[in-house]
Amino acid sequence: MTPLKIEEEVASIVLLGSFNPAIFQPSWLAQKGLLGASEAEGAILDVVHPEVASFRTGWLTLSVTRNKFIALTSAATHFAPLRDLVLGVFELLEHTPVTALGLNRALQYRLGSKEARDSLGDKLMPKDRWDGVLDQPKLRTLTAEGARTDALVGKLNIRIEPAANHIDGVFFEFNNDLRPSREDHPVAELMSIVRTHHDRLMRDAAARAEAMLKKAGF
């Protein structure tokens, strides 16, 4: 059987902690050599405020509030630049108080028909379990939490639901919810995780999605 292709995807790196949103502007990133001058000049500013900053370039979306930093891209060719940008930012802001790291990948596949998508939902959520409870049950959102199988501190969360933009599509989201193992120097520890494990975890998300689809007969 021909493997299904990824139709759409998003990778994101999320940090929880205490941030100064006003710093995170395209001009500052360009000044520090983390964003090209032309990219910075062409960036679309959604909001720049002491409480929130958000902008977009051709490949990057950056959004920062007082307690959350989110950098994301929807192009697999920019997964590595996304990683490197985040590493560069927090090498500069090495004393930022942070408490958690999310290394996340969302993937969307098209199964060929609505019937095929519904069949996947039936295998993930068998209808007979709902006899006498719900008529004509259909999968809308399935979430699961699992223990880590590597040495990292945290957990793996998975969300599966029908794609919003294709009647035959299915959406997988993998959230590696990671924590520093010590209270001292959390930025350095979490950036070491990004440097060492980001690429592996991006591959792992796709492998897990494909394994689930294969088990369901796709």
Image: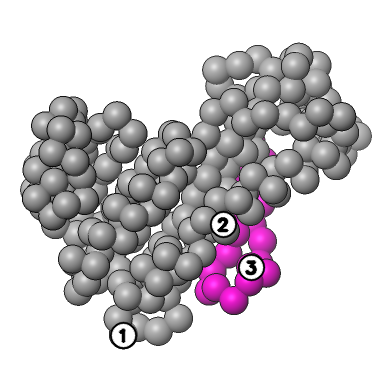
Using a 10 Å C-alpha cutoff, classify the residue at mark 2 as few (fewer than 14 neighbours), some (14 to 19) or many (20 or more): some
Q: Amino acid at mark 2?
A: Leu
Q: Earlier in the sequence, mark 3 or mark 1?
A: 3
- Of the two numbered discs 2 and 3 in the rendering, the one whose residue sits closer to the viewer: 2
**Residue 198 belongs to magenta span:** no
Could you say where residue 37 lies in the image, as x and y percent from the top left? 13, 38
Residue, x 64% and y 45% (percent of image)? Answer: 206
Note whether residue 143 is visible: no
Q: Earlier in the sequence, mark 2 or mark 3?
A: 3
Mark drawn on residue 201: 2
Q: Are marks 2 and 3 in contact (CB under 8 Å)?
A: no
Q: Amino acid at mark 1?
A: Asp
Screen quadrant of the C terminus: top right
Mark drawn on residue 202: none
> In the rendered image, which residue does mark 3 sit on?
148
> In the rendered image, which residue does mark 1 sit on?
184
